[in-house]
Image: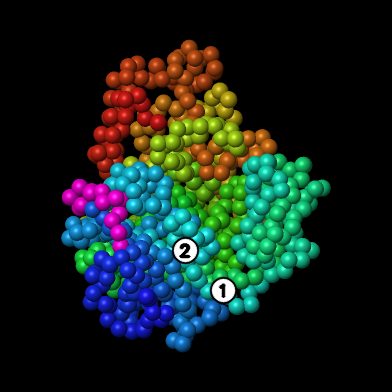
Amino acid sequence: MIPAALPRRGPIARALATAFLSLAAVAVVPSAQARVVALDVVSVEPAFAGRSFGTVGAYERVVAKARYAVSPADGHNAGIVDIDKAPRNAQGEVEFSGDVEILRPVSAGRGNGRLLYDVPNRGAKLGLALFNDAPYSNGTSKAEEAGNGYVFAQGYTVVWSAWQPDVAPGAGRQVLQVPVVPDSRGLSREEIVFDNTTNPAVLDLTYPAASLDPAQATLTVRNNEADPRASLPGLSFRYLSPTRIEITRPEGAHLGAIYEFIYPAADSKVSGLGFAAVRDLVSYLRYEAPTAVSGGKRPVYAYGFGFSQSGRFLRGFVQEGFNSDERGRPVFDGIIPHAAGSRGVYLNARFAQPGRYSREHEDHVYPGDQFPFAWGVSRDPVSGNKGGLLNQGRNQPKVIQTDTALEVWQGRSSLLNTDGAGNPLKVPDNVRLFLLAGLPHFPVIGQKSAVSPVCKYPTNTLFPGAPLRALLHDLDEWVSAGKKPPASRFPGSAPGQWVTPETVPAALAKVPGFTWTGAINRISVVDHGTVPPKEGKPYQVLVPRTDDNGHEIDALRLPMIEVPRATYLGWNTRRYGYGDPHVCGLAGSRLPLAATRAEREKSGDTRASLEERYPTPAAYVAQVKKTADTLVADRLLLPEDAERFVRLAGEGGLE
């Protein structure tokens, strides 16, 4: 059994490696410097059914629980909201705990000495799906869950740990337990878009209601974000429990209408401890307990990767100064925030809701997306504030931020290198920006284009695994060998590369069945001191110029974009009754090219047909190979991925 409490001081257990080989739960006690009180190992077992990865061999899976304790008096923790109000132990520290999972080579000497920390997304492990072209899964026991095995063949030790306090336990999710702020009360706001016909419908509340008196809460509905909030005839709610309500939906509301529930909430959590949890665990694994990572081989470098919400977490992590541990040492040497746009995360706040993120139609004015947007420090011409994500000065990581085409429209990517008035901003030397032309936000490997009941156009399923693998390799060379990565491929390096969203691309003006709306997730200065929030001065949000196919020009362009068989848009549009004409969630669009010139001319489509572009299958393959070879030479595609693209082109086309 694990003791209920372990001493804070003492040596790292000499038998740590042996303990990790045991399937019995054990407690690993760190040195006095570590802010991880103990790492309670639950199990060690073969990963991926014992599958072997190149010269590295097999991996093993370590499941553990980390126990943390931090001092509110330490300046490194002073910015954590409500930490001063949290209960403390006898040493005056705030305690919390969370899940940990580590994948490491069975033969430690075969690892590459790199720790790859994959920030969980709502508790889920998504990094392997992207780097390894694997199915989305929280499992690491089946052979197929490793996908192509890329990161394991390189010898990375992969780590996940909990940082989000409101994640529901189960299904392999990483869950963080943090203290509740005593006697905390305040208004909390929930929004939901059902996008279905269910009536009545259930809404789970993030925090328990402080009162079940319905007169103290308000429920409104509106068809569009900018519409006035209204209480339509037939709209009502009732509490099913302190954390759940039932909503009766009125006949006059669209299926994609926005429902807003404002209620008196209790039991806010010290959610900002999620930043400290990641800081302290990665620091511990790097400096205090290397055996826990690699069986005895100390990790030389640590990289952070985050997709979507997790990428926004990394942006906030750096901005709020958590890339320095309590001894002033660097946590991450380099990070790759993927599909984060210019947004942060709604974490370090009272009654935080870190799962929320602004889109044009959904969650539009939730916190987490206000200035600063860019990595460099600048003066915001709209709010008047000064700041930047790299404002802390010390231990700045090397940054490769990758955005899909969706982030331009929903994540306001233009604010990464333009100010609120549309003027260019300098990108710091330790930052690279890459726009992945034509790619959607959240594709699934192997998924086919389909029609959604909510979105107008067939979905876009282009996958970002290939460029992410190349850029991870570039980041490693940048950190470990000082070899500079490729220059940014992102609009804004020259005038005219950013344009207004109202500018209709000529290539899309006459696509059959397609209508350009110019809809985009705009942003204003928001006053979150009122509930609901109030919008003020607007920012200028821009979009990239496009080519004759409607694809972004100033971007990283994969063969599927450079040698297209369709126009691939990162965004889609909501159908009538579901929020038309607003941007449809995270979906992209696929607009096929006409097969023949005659077909194209009959429809009025101005985009060249397939027969006009590629007179023979061999001509198509040759163009794909030329593009792939150029990307390899530019270090934006690995040779094995270039070969795969050429092979797929010969088998019938890249989709």
Give whichever of 384, 548 is nearer the camera.
548
Left/right of residue 650 with respect to residue 188 in the rendered view:
left
Quadrant assignment, res 532: bottom right
Gap in angstroms between the C-alphas marked 2 and 1: 15 Å
Quadrant assignment, res 206: bottom right
Name the residue at 77% across, 50% down: 235
Name the residue at 52% across, 40% down: 587
Left/right of residue 631 with respect to residue 518 in the rendered view:
left
The dot on residue 180 is 1
Which residues make up the magenta segment? 44-57
Name the residue at 40% across, 36% down: 446
The dot on residue 50 is none
Q: Secondary structure at mark 1?
A: loop
Give whichever of 185, 502 is nearer the camera.
185
Q: Which residue is mark 2?
A: 175
Q: Residues within 10 Å of mark 2 (few under 14, many from 20)?
A: many
Q: Position of residue 205 (x, y in %)?
A: 63, 60
Q: Position of residue 432 (x, y in %)?
A: 36, 51
Tag 1: amino acid: Val
Q: Secondary structure at mark 2?
A: loop
